[in-house]
Amino acid sequence: MKTHLLLALQVAAVTASAELQEERALLKKNEPARVAELLQERLKTRPQDPWLLYNSGVAAYAAKDFPKANEVWQQLAATELPDALREQVWLQIGNVSYRTVQAAVEKEPDAAISGLEQSREAYRVAIAFNKKNKDATHNLKVVEKQLERVYAQLAQRLAQEAKKENSDERAIEKLQAALTYQEQAQALNRESKEHQEARKEIEQALAERFEKKAAETEKKADQRSTNNASERQQVQEQLQTALADFQQAQILAPERESAKQGEERVEQKLAGMFNKAARQQQKEADQQAQNQPQQAAEKYEEALQNFQEALAMKPEHADAQQGEKEVQKSLEKLHLDQGDKLAEQGTKQAEQNPSQAAEKLLTALEHFEQAKSAAPENEAIQPRIDAVQAKLPELLVALGEKEQGEAQKAEPQSLDSAVAHLEKAAVSFEKAEQLSPENAKAKEGQQEVQEDLARLREQLGKNAEKQQPQKSDKPKDGEESFESMLAKLKKNQQQKEVRAKPHAGQKYDPDRSSNLRNW
């Protein structure tokens, strides 16, 4: 591996005249440690000189002080550098990262990976600065070749360990890690048939383990009771886990017919469970529809969701298809009945009790919209929505005006109560505007309410400030002042610092096995 040490010092010499003559002479005598000492002396007068810093790292590297060299170059890489030096710094980071882990490559390859990957990235940066950097290009190929070998080695080791595992989960974890390493090795050498075959072997082993785990989970689910909701939920979760594992096995090995059959079998079981739960919820909702419409609507929604889950598993499931249609029809009827009932009540109360009338009409509107969502093809629903929307703005404006009046009455006694009434008025005017954007009374009322709210909130803020107790720095009788306590604290701290102060008094071997350029 060639050295760039002389080249680096020559570049520095151009900048710093002939001051490096002694260092060059020492380098020819293979005395890098002495060079490092001289450079450290020069750095005392020019500590920020990037050329001196760079060369101090080179000298440390030549003396095999890799941690020191890496520290110097990493610090330089984080600073602004001359173009001529920048790519050299990254080249050297690649070199030192490579050298640092060489002792671990054979015995502890997993510990060497991070250093090799860092080396590769550093060379890439150097090449990004200068695509004609032949040393960085060559060294990058060397590092990638070693990374390829290490990735493949780790993949095989983990695959062999997985074979001995009795636990499918632990075997899967190791095989997944092995597959990742093998994919990384293959990415570095796409033409390698050996990598392709090794990857396929790992994928087959992983698919086999996933399928085995899925079959065992399915068997456990089949053996469990489904007498209550909690047990059914646990069985459902187990079947979903089994399904995911069967699917994963198919992704890894599409030709495995047993995995495909397992997936279809579990999907059928899950669809049956969802459909059964939906039918039970539908039955309960039918029983509640007359006297407990709100609870019935919630049950129908749950049933609808379960029918849809069943169809997501098995789109051809006939009973789930029929159940979905029945529930949608029941929801449509339930919401229409409730909407009609509330709309009629709200209309009758409009003159005598606009507040309750508005509330009921708003709820009726919500029911009609939900009915339309369940049956968008029903042309009889939109006229109901239009009729309610036409009545609501006037009622909401009246309600807002009423709350304005209540606020005026409450203001002399309680600002908080007045604000609460105004906030209700603001909501009513806002809803009226949403339903009827051109409603002048709603716009005028909203403006008045906002002005009154701003005024009252400002007054509340002033009142709160007046009620806050005044702070006093003067200590009570017999109480130590804050300043006195602070002075004591500082004095104690100074004494501790004084007690904590310490008392006074307290040959180069070239690398003959180099295979990378530059070193």
Image (cartoon, rainbow, N blue to C red):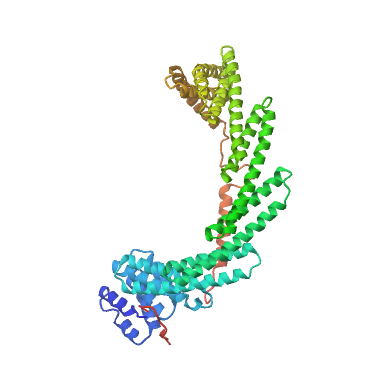
Which residue is more in the foreground, 315 or 484? 315
- Quadrant of residue 122 in the image? bottom left
Question: Is residue 6 shown to the viewer in this render?
Answer: yes
Height in image: 256 above or below 285?
Answer: below
Question: Is residue 45 shown to the viewer in this render?
Answer: no
Q: Position of residue 514 (x, y in %)?
A: 40, 82
- The residue lying at 73 percent from left, 43 percent from top is 228
Which residue is more in the foreground, 127 or 183? 183
Q: Quadrant of the C terminus?
A: bottom left
Height in image: 63 above or below 439?
Answer: below
Height in image: 111 above or below 332?
Answer: below
Q: Position of residue 424 (x, y in %)?
A: 54, 24
Q: Where is residue 485 in the image (x, y as percent from the top left)?
A: 59, 51
Height in image: 305 above or below 513?
Answer: above
Q: In which quarter of the image is the N terminus?
A: bottom left
Q: Residue furthest top?
A: 351
Which residue is more in the foreground, 448 or 425? 425
